[in-house]
Amino acid sequence: MSQELTKRIVEVWLETIEPNKRFHYKEAMNGEVSPEAYGHLRKIFHDLVIDRKAKSSGYRDGYYERLEQIEPIRSFSPNEDQFYDLVFPLGHGGDGSEFGFENYMDISPGDLIVITGVSNYGKTGLVLNIMGENLDKGVTLMGNEYVTADRIITPKLKRRLLRMNWVEWEDGNGELRFELLPVKHNYEDYIRKDRLNIIDWISMPKDFWGIAQIMDSIKSRIGNGLVVLVLQKVRGRDWGDGGEFSERLSDVYFKIDPFGENESMLTVGKVKEPKGRITGRSWAFSIVDGGANLHNIRELKRCPKCRGAHSSKNCPSCHGKGFVELNSL
């Protein structure tokens, strides 16, 4: 380097490095430091560690990471009465039935809702209905199955949305009232701050524990918005892709499983801010109109005769489903 190497110059360079990204001190200043100055450069990094601007990575000698500077919080702002007014789906398939989750849980700005479920049992139908109910909040929909290679909405999605005839999808100028991002990877990098972000879906075929880091990155970028994240789930398992790691950073965790041959069962797995007994309760529902609308939403209870035993396929009460309607005799 032609200019004198100072602590401030290195500190300015360090601010361009992503926090927690490992680097060797000889890579500082884009590798332009002469070998004669390596000792001086090492001393500068020693001082930056003391100043808590950097830290030793613990990888090998000479490797560092930039320590993210976090300002302390010094007030109770925002108001504790601030909630996110999320409208949960209704049975628009002709009966007006509802889950009624608004009565059982508080949703706050910055929350992350996870919907995990068995393939082809209503995850996408549920999140599209959430989008339709909340278009006025500003919605960003991300997914890799909604757009063709020519970057237009797939006919399948368009047909499904048009069957949701209770929603005005376009404004007066013919523009969509929601933002569709054809994202296939790195969803956390495309979160729209202060909006309702719906991600359908993230796949974790390997390194399933990585879902925790992805969810942490997502939550750090929500601001006063909300994220609804969809994950696949193997039939019979308690958690979706990512295992129990997928539940740890969620604020609300829903699980969708088959209920008989033609219906779905949604079970509440976790609620950080419950307003009553809600965890573990289940609701059955149907998806009608070609996957567009929900129908016949009703709460379930475990079968009083077989208690949901796997061996009770011939139970006269639940017929092997393990659950019956809450209001049944």
Image (cartoon, grey):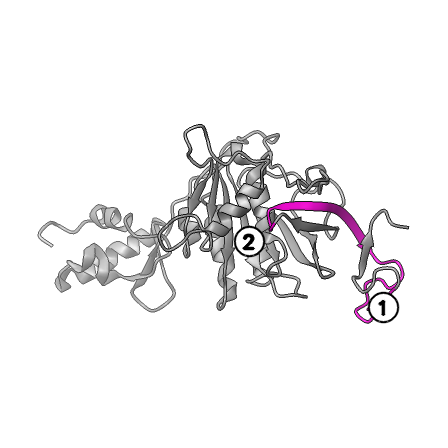
- Give the vertical position of 265 relative to 166 (above or below): below
Query: What amino acid type should be assigned to the residue bearing mark 2?
Result: Val
Q: Say the numbered circle drawn on residue 195.
A: none
Q: How many residues crowd around disc 2 within 10 Å: few (fewer than 14), some, or many (20 or more)?
A: many
- Outermost residue toward the left in this view: 2
Percent x, y of residue 97: 73, 40
| Numbered disc total | 2
Q: Which residues are magenta?
A: 290-315
The answer to which of marks 2 and 1 sits earlier in the sequence is 2
Q: Is residue 223 left or right of residue 276?
A: left
Q: Is residue 311 highlighted in magenta? A: yes
Measured in 3D between alpha carbons, the distance from the residue under mark 2 to the one under mark 1, in whole angstroms, is 34 Å
Q: Main secondary structure of the magenta part?
A: loop
The residue that label 1 is drawn on is: 314
Badge 1 marks a residue whose secondary structure is loop
Q: Secondary structure at mark 2?
A: strand
Give how far across and how far down residue 294 sits, in percent.
66, 46
Q: Answer with left or right where residue 129 lies relative to residue 224.
A: right
Q: Which of the two residues, 70 or 288, is positioned nearer the viewer here?
A: 288
Type of residue at label 1?
Asn
- In the rendered image, residue 255, in percent from the top left (x then y), is placed at 65, 55
Q: Which residue is mark 2?
A: 230
Question: Image point 51% across, 59% down: which residue?
Answer: 211
State the residue at coordinates (65%, 65%): 235
Image quarter of the N terminus: bottom left
Q: Closer to the camera, 86 or 157?
A: 157
Please say whether residue 104 is visible from this viewpoint: no
298 within the magenta span? yes
